[in-house]
Image (cartoon, rainbow, N blue to C red):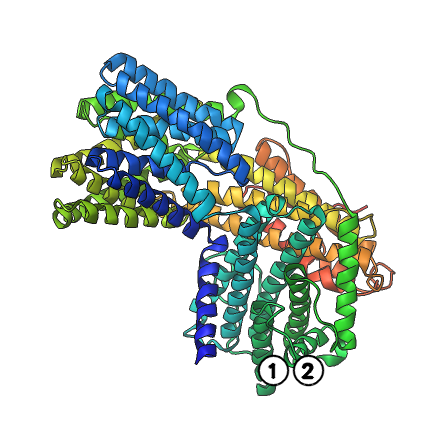
Amino acid sequence: MRATGGSARVRLWDRVAASDPGLLRLTAGLRTVAALALTLLVLAVARVPVLYLVAGAMAAMVATFAVRENSRAAQAVTLALGLPMAVVSVSLGTLLHQLLVVGDVFFVALIFAAVYVRRYGDRGTALGLIGFQIYFLSLFVHATTAQLPALYGVLVVAFVASAVVRFALLPQTPAGTLDRLRRAFRARLGQLVATQTELLDAGPEEIDKVLGELRTGTARLHETALMIQGRLEDGTGDEAAAHLLQRRVADAEIAAERLGLLLLTARSAERTATLTLHLPGAPLPSGGALPVREEATAALRRDLAALRLLVLRPAGVATGAASAQLRNRLLGYREEENLPAASPAVQDVFRGLGETARAVLGLRTALDGPQDDADDTPATARSREELDAEDAAIESSEEETPAEPARTGLQRPTTRAALQVAVGSSLAIFGGELLSSQRWYWAVLTCWIVFLNTASTGEIVVKGYRRLLGTVLGVVAGIGLAGLVGHHTWLAFGLVLVFIFAMFYTAPLSYTLMSFFVTAMLGLLYTLLNTYTLALLGLRIAETALGAVCGVIAAAFVLPVRTDRRTDELLGAVLERLAEVTRAAADQLSGAPPADLVDQARELDQALADLRAAIQPLTHPITPMRTRRNTARYVLALLETCAYHARALAATAELLPSHPSIAADPRLRTAGRRIVQNIEAIGAHVTDPAAVAAVESGPSIASMLEPGTLHAPRYGRVTDRVLRHLQRLDEAVSGLARPLGLTTVPARTT
């Protein structure tokens, strides 16, 4: 029973780790709630009035969420600088509140400065946020000059409480965060393998659901890999170890995604397009259950379960002869003589199992250290030798990526955003005071918030819409909460803590939900301040709508960045990175000197993630342009297909230097040249639609590389490994021509 309970706890923890990689959302919510609770506890012992309790709660929240540096030393410095910034800000807010024109002009100047200082990184962003939010706090509690000394004391308590929670009660180090992200990757990889097992037996009624889960699981695994990439520099002190972990994570991700595609192919009478994984709603290729004998199906089911066990169980747990037997059997499928009798498509699945097991072995070595090799079979020993050779090659390679030139003047995003938000806030102040001379700052707050982490007019429209929707729902909830709480002060503060945790936990998932919890929390604070009325909550909706409209107007007319322009820039960046990765991989597969392909592939992934975020206004359900939405989704799906195959080519190319048994094939440079030229032609057309560009079509990559067609022998197995990826990449790149308005012409003969 103890073992069962322990297993249940492990499964529950794996689910939590997978749903919240690195426990970043959980930590942010708990840390903010703990800082608020500690602040309220100290102030309650001091028996201060409710007004100071509300001010302390808001100050503690700001002091906690504003500081975002990874280094603990940098966090301490920012927090120390934030306290005097908060004191100055609350003083100016209190003193200038009565001076209508001067106060408004200063508020706009403060908003401009708070956005402009983001150019100085996380510290500038934090100090600007503290300055703005504490100024807002003084307006919210209607602070007077006589209350300033007490407010100074409240700010000191709030910042000290935030520091105690951050550095003592709930510390979070870069190394600890990276370790939790690695556990999350392992948990999500295990979930993906479990979904692939379900795909094996899914019938016609369940296949759509399982396929949706397969897409989601693949995307979540990729998301976690990118998060690990972003934390490697701060989380590890050893550059070689960081590079090794990056490579092993990339290998495991690519191998798992390929295994899912092979399973889909085995279920179908036709070749499964990679697009099936990336495009929501794409139909499954024709075919029903897996066309194999029952013993082969049973073996696949058994081996997928064994693979999941090897993924989830750390090295210290998965010891003994049973674990070694599972590992050896899976790695044995990398040898042709160990494949079971089945159709070629099903044998490909077993090969994929072997390659995924090899990637998992490398991942376990990178995460858990050296593994026990006492019971290794010859196939397992060869896999270890390959991994050791790769490790040595990774440790000896060091390349620096040149930094891109920084933008200056009005081209700098922070300068442009500062001007836009200053103009939008000026409009919000004017309109907000027409609605209410006491609550006009709600419009300014909304205008400020819709500009956070947005880069185009379309993004601001979508964010403003979501904030308004969340505010309306929060007002409805606030009406019921006001009646529930009444004059029970500590019940209200307890609910405030719950809502603040929910706000931070849901913020990365849904901006609408976050806005809902913010509004519901503010309704409780108004109740505590005895200023709650239905008219006040109605006014909040009106001020929120006004602030969103002012933000959209400013974004549309002050140095505007149109959504089309923004997405075209990012699309051009994706195509440039795609061409670089494809060219470098094809060259290395052809025998060129080794390059750092994993880093290039991750740059492609990051560029694609930026495009995916920027394209949301075009793919949002409320957009009236349905044809444009479908085109945007289709282009994004094709780009994700290209990125997957480019990552696979890069991973295979990096095998060559450490695997003398796998020889390069000079023909691959010629095969990749057409793909790269087509990518560059599409990129040139995106950058300048007036440019004359066309995509060249020609013989399939498969026919170009058939044995004997170029009077050259097949070079080892590298061509077999990459042929499918080259073929699919060629097809996907050609598929981009039509939706992007390019013509297709026959390839020129020489």
| Position of residue 272 measured from the top left corner of the image (x, y, whole percent) | 58, 65
Residue 719 in view here: no
Helix, strand or loop at disc 1? helix
Q: Tell me how far mark 2 sits from mark 1, CA to CA.
A: 9 Å
Q: Residues within 10 Å of mark 1 (few under 14, many from 20)?
A: few
**Left or right for 656, reference 188:** right
The answer to whether residue 537 is above or below residue 418 is below
- Whether residue 536 is situated above or below residue 410 in the rendered picture: below
Above or below residue 445? Residue 601 is below
Q: Residue at x 79, y 49 (%)?
A: 396
Q: Amino acid at mark 2?
A: Pro
Q: Earlier along the polypeptide chain: callout 2 or callout 1?
A: 1
Along the line of sight, the residue nearer the viewer: 242 or 443: 242
Circle 2 packing at 10 Å, graded few (<14), some (14-19), many (20+), is some
What residue would you read off at disc 1? 299
Q: Which residue is label 2 attached to?
A: 340
The quadrant holding residue 569 is top right
| Residue with the most extreme front position | 46
Are the residues at dot 2 and dot 1 in contact (C-beta closer than 8 Å)? yes
Q: Of the residues shown, which amino acid type is indicated by label 1?
A: Ala
